[in-house]
Image: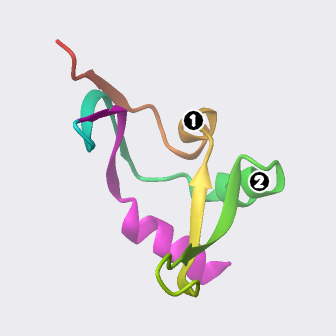
């Protein structure tokens, strides 16, 4: 866990979390960016508790290769529920990108 805590401090020293709406136009995906939340300095003491509560989860990604039927290993990724961001980080700034 110490190594994981260290990586969180390093990777999320300062992070922008973006909310976007996805639509398809003529077969191409387009994004409308709506909000940005700017977080800094994660509260590492909260991390383990948020995992225990299921607020932070770990997914292992595997991508199916359509033309061969095989799979490609994409690796693990942590996900945090929106309510967990305010528990893992000190008060942050939010920006409305629709204005």
| N-term mark: 1 or 2 | 2
Q: Residues within 10 Å of mark 2 (few under 14, many from 20)?
A: few
Within 10 angstroms of label 1, few (less than 14), some, or many (20 or more) residues? few
Give the residue at mark 2.
49
Which residue is at a point 25% across and 29% down the rendered structure image? Answer: 32
Give the SS element for disc 2: helix
Q: Is residue 16 left or right of residue 74?
A: left
Location of the N terminus by quadrant is: bottom right
> Which residue is painted at 57% across and 35% down in the image?
82
Quadrant housing residue 57: bottom right
Left or right position of 66 against 20: right
Q: CA distance from mark 1 to mark 2?
A: 16 Å
The residue closer to the viewer here, 55 or 49, is 55
Element type where label 1 sits in the image: helix
Observer-nearest of 36 and 10? 36
In the picture, residue 60 is in which quadrant?
Answer: bottom right
Residue 16, how many percent across, how many down?
31, 45
Residue 56 at x, y percent in the picture: 68, 53
Q: Is residue 14 magenta?
A: yes
- Where is the C terminus found, in terms of image quarters? top left
On screen, residue 1 versus residue 67, left or right, reads right
Residue 63 spot, x, y in % from top left: 54, 74
Above or below: residue 12 compared with residue 96: below
Placement of 75 over or under 26, stated as above or below = below
The magenta segment: 1-25
Foreground residue among 81 and 52: 81
Dot in front, 1 or 2 = 1
- In the picture of the structure, the residue carrying the numbered disc 1 is 82
Residue 36 tag number: none
The vertical placement of 8 against 99, above or below, is below
The answer to whether the residue labelled 1 contacts the one labelled 2, judged by CB atoms less than 8 Å apart, is no
């Amino acid at each position: 866990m110490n190594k994981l805590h260290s990586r969180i401090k390093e990777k999320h020293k300062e992070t922008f979390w973006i909310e976007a709406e996805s639509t398809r136009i003529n077969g191409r995906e387009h994004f409308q960016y709506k909000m940005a939340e700017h977080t800094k300095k994660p509260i590492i003491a909260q991390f383990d508790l948020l995992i225990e509560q299921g607020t932070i989860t770990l997914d292992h990604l595997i991508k199916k290769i359509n033309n061969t039927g095989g799979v490609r290993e994409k690796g693990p990724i942590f996900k945090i529920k929106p309510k967990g961001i305010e528990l893992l980080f000190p008060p942050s700034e939010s920006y409305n990108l629709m204005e």
